Image (cartoon, helix red, strand yellow):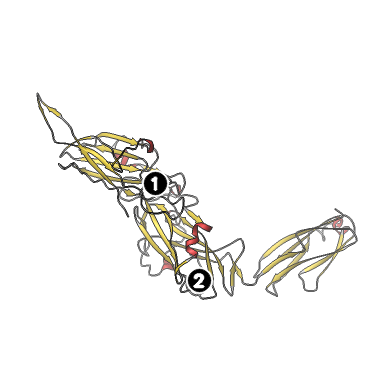
Amino acid sequence: MKKYLLYLLSVLSVPVGCTRTETPTISVCFSLLPPGGPLTRANDPDEDRIADYNLFIFNAYGLLEEKVYVSSRQLVMEDGVVTHHTRLMQNVPYTILAAANLGYELPCRTLAEAKAYRYFMAYPDEFTPGVPMATVLDGVQVGADGQFPLPLKRLMARVDLQIDRTALDPDVHFTIRSVQIGGCPSSVQLFKATSKAESREHIFREGYVKSWREVDALNKDTSVGISGICRFYLLENCQGDLLENVTTDRGKVFDNSLYQEVCSYIEIKADYRSPLWNSRSDSFLIYRFYLGENLNNFDVHRNACYQVTVRPEGDGLREDSWRVDKSGLEPAGKAFILHPAAYNECASGEDFHLWCEVRPAGTPMTIDPLAYDTDPRVREIFDYTLDADGYGLTLHTKKGGSAVVYFKAGPPVNRDTLAMVVVDP
């Protein structure tokens, strides 16, 4: 990760008693690196950009000597870098806090307020101006050379996700449709060594997400079976070591607890197809896994890059849990199709055939003409005969009105629908 340098320089004359003396001074100059390499998509952040900054300088007694906010329109460029000048005494300890790309002036007036301040993002990818950054240095002194590096750290972590399909069975198709950060923090303490989400109020309801064309890289091989990389971002969330003696990935889960809500995880939704199972047209196979430094840890550090490779094996369905959610799958070759349509019209005196195409063969079916057995007015409109195979019926219409028929397929299809026939519309 690239770092950002802020250099301090100054010149100051200080009277002492009745005698004027020249005190060594140094001017303060922020040196901010320009944007880095190419982006992966239009709204990925420029990780090197500085669009605005806040600067606090406190003296050895913790008193605020200078507070500055410089917006994007006020930035001054010198020799290709953003600069800011002030005046400080040399060889005197200061505490210096800086933050960039927040988009507003911090309201803090004391050192305690600044160190306790929690910055909130309005939405998970609110980093168009640049990734939020911050740093704090305690008890530092400006040297005689007038150069003072102040490295900023990005407050977000980056996850570089890749899919390894080399261990999948050859007849399994696994196409990523979306990736989302679950437990995605909405806030971070700027000037604390580590920050974490402390309650569900510090978590976005829907975290950072990329979908469809934005995740194309995960469906295209850069080498045999190995996909390209897709990047995801989240604020620091250092929850620490929360489990003990976990030795496999499938053990890194929680039963009902607050940790389920505040720990960060990746959720992958995929179109899935194999000889035995397919994802339904409106659903997906879902993979989930927590982030962290190891199997017992749930830290996601600021200014860090995590390389994550997902490697499904065999049919990709060997685990049945929160981590591998198969509720969106149905048996391969399954069908539930109503014929001729959900809404139909006919003339009185006609026989009208309704049926449901269901696979696999042998799936149980329930057919119920609604209110036929309880309302004599319905029986005045039609009678009916069930098909011999149990998958349809014929309405023998007698006069104008409406017939509503309920179709329900049992396991493994587990689908239902209604069909309406309007007689003499």
User: Outermost residue, front direction?
Assistant: 79
Closer to the camera in the image, 109 or 134? 134
Whether 361 is drawn above or below 195: the answer is below
Q: Position of residue 371 (x, y in %)?
A: 80, 58
Which residue is painted at 61% across and 68% down in the image?
330
Between residues 148 and 282, which one lies in front from this camera angle? Answer: 148
Residue denoted by label 1: 130
Q: Position of residue 284 (x, y in %)?
A: 56, 63
Question: How would you rate the neighbour count of disc 1 (Cα within 10 Å): few for under 14, some for 14-19, many for 20 or more?
Answer: many
SS for callout 1: loop
Other-residue count near label 2 (Cα within 10 Å), few / some / many at <14 / 14–19 / ≥20: many
Question: In the rendered image, which quarter contains the N terminus?
Answer: bottom left
- The kind of residue tagged 2 is Gly
Gap between marks 2 and 1 measured at Cα: 38 Å
Occupied quadrant, residue 91: top left
Give the number of the disc on residue 316: 2
